[in-house]
Amino acid sequence: MIDNNIIPEVEYHPLEPFLPANASILMLGSFPPQKKKWSMNFFYPNLQNDMWRIMGYIFFDDKEHFLNNDKKSFNKEAIIEFLIDKGIALYDTASAVRRLQDNASDKYLEVVESTNIELLLKQLPKCKTIVTTGQKATDILCDFFSISQPSIGGKTMFEFHDKKISLYRMPSSSRAYPMKVEKKSEFYKLIFNDLDI
């Protein structure tokens, strides 16, 4: 627990946006966990986060597909190869935050600076789909575009610079969100079925 009399330091995003030239999907989380929780130097690095288990389950029928042999870290190279192959870009909706508690919970993240989503989309000319991977990411994105939130597992359409974009709201891949990997995967699979990926 952080002392209420001490204002937590501002943390700036430690990763560059991952923006493959062929990306048709932009997945946006909130902000990375503390470095002590990382098992690799990439997005969704916490071994307790199920994003890469969800992707392994959907595309390879194996939750452990992206785990290294020691099961203690994710295989960054295999993940990057997969993302480029599928045309998936990654970043987060917050560029700077304060952690109000000593954990990775979105509930205790104070967003100091939101990401310039418009700038990200300008670098992704083929992107017509945005996926938010949690509540805080959805809140920030919907505020940015002044659109109403879809239900979890749902989508909404909006126009941005004369381009139609689909926003899918997915359940958080964090273990703090109480849903089995297989069930979360059913939601995420809807996106790839819709896009024939």
Image (cartoon, rainbow, N blue to C red):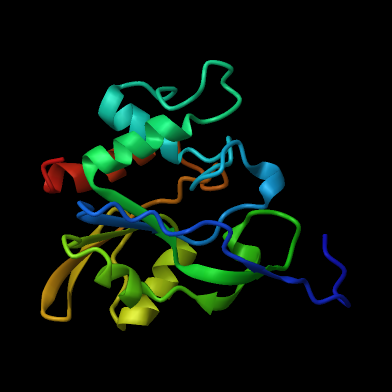
- Asked whether the viewer can see residue 181, the reply is no
Seen from the viewer's position, the closer of residues 131 and 20 is 20
Q: Is residue 77 left or right of residue 162?
A: right
Residue 144's image quarter? bottom left
The residue positioned 37% from the left and 39% from the top of the image is 80
Seen from the viewer's position, the closer of residues 81 and 128 is 81
Q: Quadrant of the C terminus?
A: top left
The residue positioned 60% from the left and 64% from the top of the image is 107
The residue positioned 29% from the left and 53% from the top of the image is 153
Q: Quadrant of the N terminus?
A: bottom right
Instruction: Estimate the x, y position of residue 177 in percent, counting from the top left.
Output: 51, 47
The residue positioned 67% from the left and 49% from the top of the image is 35
Residue 65's image quarter? top left
Q: Is residue 17 above or below residue 149?
A: above
Q: Is residue 143 above or below residue 68?
A: below
Residue 13's image quarter? bottom right
Q: Is residue 22 left or right of residue 67?
A: left
Q: Is residue 111 left or right of residue 93?
A: right
Q: Is residue 197 above or below residue 95?
A: above
Seen from the viewer's position, the closer of residues 26 and 122 is 122
The residue most toward the top is 69
Instruction: Estimate the x, y position of residue 159 in percent, counting from the top left.
Output: 16, 77
Seen from the viewer's position, the closer of residues 39 and 15 is 15
Instruction: Estimate the x, y position of residue 46 in percent, counting from the top left.
Output: 58, 41
